[in-house]
Amino acid sequence: MKQISPGLAAHLAGGTTTLAWCWKLTRRDGVTLGFTEHDCNLTFDGVTYEAACGLTASALETSSGLNVDNLDVAGAFSSLRLDEGDLAAGLYDDADIEIWRVNWTNVDERLLMRKGNLGEIARSGAAFTAELRGLAHRLNQPTGRLYQYGCDADFGDARCGLDTDDWTIAGTVTSANGATLIVEGLSDFAAGHFTRGRLTFASGANEGAVMEVKSHAPGGRLELWRAPARPVAPGDTVSILAGCDKQFSTCHIRFANAKNFRGFPYMPGNDFVLARAGN
């Protein structure tokens, strides 16, 4: 049950209210942004909530039990702090959200209505729609291990045991066309070595952005799963981590790390289940 402060309770009981919605957004990189539907900026708890930000929210619904309570926020990139490139780069993925109901004549009279995370974000030109997921959505996330052929460790984590620095190569972009990059410095590696790897921009307009490599072809040709959020220029430097397809043969032959393989390569398959004893 929510606890309403005496001041806000008295304001609500007064018949005439001066209430506004405020949204506090904390991105994955720690940047905190505030927005409000009110026509003047509001400030509390050290956060300034920007007015006229172009955000509108759907109806806020709450249910009992463990159902995931969702709502949608639609808006446009009207705020100088809402950058389309940051959105495309994934900085807002799974960002923390707080939704406040505030008396704009006295911001000390406020109530936290909902906490959650940003879910699916859809963009169309200069507009976007973001799904806000309640805290219960965490209960839908898979946990634990799966009995499967493939490795379930992340390349370079404690369970994998490899040092990613030993498998990361620096390169320079010589040309770019959408999601396809030609990178100088990869000639010593066979095609496919960086497939499913990670590319990090070390300079240029996309500096700090991390992209997944879809495929690696001869001549240093890398195809990413999606185009970078901002233009890539010749001379931009990148670092590329070798790819791992989570198979035992790759772990054993390419990385000499079979002892740390976290899958079950010898688990029986359908042929074993359907087999019958011979005469």
Image (cartoon, rainbow, N blue to C red):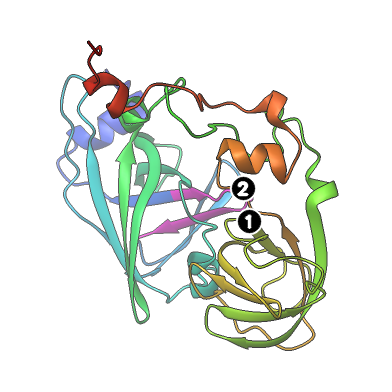
- The secondary element bearing badge 1 is classed as loop
Going 62% across and 53% down the picture, which residue do you hit? 31
- Estimate the x, y position of residue 208 in percent, counting from the top left: 71, 63
Residue 104 in view of the camera = no
Q: Is residue 34 magenta?
A: yes
- The secondary element bearing badge 2 is classed as loop
Q: Which residue is mark 1?
A: 197
Magenta stretch: helix, strand or loop mostly: strand
Residue 244, label in figure = 2
The residue under label 1 is which amino acid type?
A: Gly
Classify 10 Å Cα crowding around label 1: few (below 14), some (14-19), many (20 and above). Answer: many
- As measured in the structure, the alpha-carbon distance from the residue carrying label 1 to the one carrying label 2 is 7 Å
Residues under numbered marks 1 and 2 in contact, where contact means CB atoms less than 8 Å apart: yes
In the displayed structure, does residue 201 sit left or right of residue 39? right
Q: Is residue 83 magenta?
A: no
Range of the magenta residues?
A: 24-36
Going 79% across and 51% down the picture, which residue do you hit? 167
Say which quarter of the image contains residue 268: top left
- Estimate the x, y position of residue 113 in percent, counting from the top left: 31, 35
